[in-house]
Amino acid sequence: MASSSSGLTFKLHPLVIVNISDHHTRVKSQSQPPPNLPAPRVFGCVIGVQRARTVEIFNSFELLYDSSTRSLDRSFLEKKQELYKKVFPNFYILGWYSTGADAEESDMHMHKALMDINENPVYVLLNPLINHTQKDLPVTIYESEMHVIDGIPQLIFARSSYTIETVEAERISVDHVAHLKPSDGGSAATQLAAHLTGIHSAIKMLNSRIRVLHHYLNAMQKGEIPYENSLLRQVSSLLRRLPAIESEKFQDEFLMEYNDTLLISYLAMFTDCSSTMNDLVDKINIAYDRHSRKGGRTAFI
């Protein structure tokens, strides 16, 4: 697969990835394919804006496309385009998306079908197969380029690089989705452990950065490195935004929160102990009940 030479910069928003993944999951659960067969592919449009040489993909919507007959429902596409134009008047159809391990030759038919809307559509491909060794996102963006192969000009897919772009609302939504209860039966304790692990990692990172800043300021104070007034102003501004933790109000609230946490911990321990005692009593009653049938003993409790 050739790399793109157009020089365009692509920015992909997480909402697009979430939409494609949701579309694939719904179709897979509804069709229920056999374990040895892949799930049906899904198709849709990606929308966004293009400013000069920067293409930013914000959102997506589904399409009705029959891959066996290679027919696209134009009326459905025009209706969805009209509805999105009312809500997002600045968004345009930039291309389309699908699922699969790699771009196929049949994808070019779908690609050409959208060229009357966008002369150079973008193709966003999501690989739904799980690869635990892969660190990058399973998303690839393709452009179409005209290449001469064996003396015949042909339109081929060229892979393009991209970056993930987010806004505040998307960061909150993605964080919420990431902390939803897993579908594989994960317990609340597992979720709590993952949440506390994330908080612990964030605190460790904050502590390491504060240490670096502290060492830097100490070296500056000792004269080992020259003074930088702009950096000192930034540090001063950062410190002024930190809450004053030596106040009496903070101590009272901290002790109250700490006592509440200890109380909840003690209640959880008592509950767990009571549950263990109840299990033990049930087992002893069962054992004494068996002996009473043989020797006339009564139950323990």
Image (spheres, grey):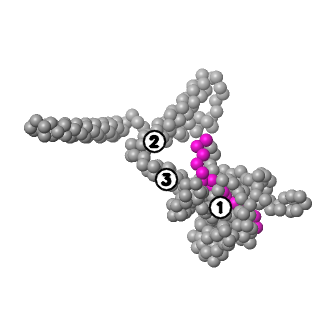
Name the disc covering residue 97, or none. 1
Q: Is residue 301 visible to the viewer in this orientation of the structure?
A: no
Locate residue 18 relative to residue 68 in the image: left or right. left
- Label 2, label 1: how far apart the Cα atoms are: 32 Å
Quadrant of the image occupied by residue 236: top right
| Residue 20, placed above or below residue 196 | below
Secondary structure under the numbered disc 1 in the rendered image = strand
Q: Earlier in the sequence, mark 1 or mark 3?
A: 1
> Given contact means CB atoms under 8 Å apart, are the residues at marks 1 and 3 in contact?
no
Which of discs 1 and 3 lies nearer the camera? The answer is 1
- Bounds of the magenta span? 118-133
Q: Nearer the viewer, mark 2 or mark 1?
A: 1
Q: Which amino acid does the dot numbered 1 rest on?
A: Tyr
Amino acid carrying mark 3 in the image: Val
Q: Nearer the viewer, residue 156 or 245?
A: 156
Q: Residue 194 bears which disc, if any?
A: 2
In the image, what residue occupies the spot 79% across and 56% down?
Answer: 6
Q: Position of residue 79 (x, y in %)?
A: 61, 75
Query: Residue farthest to the bottom?
Result: 75
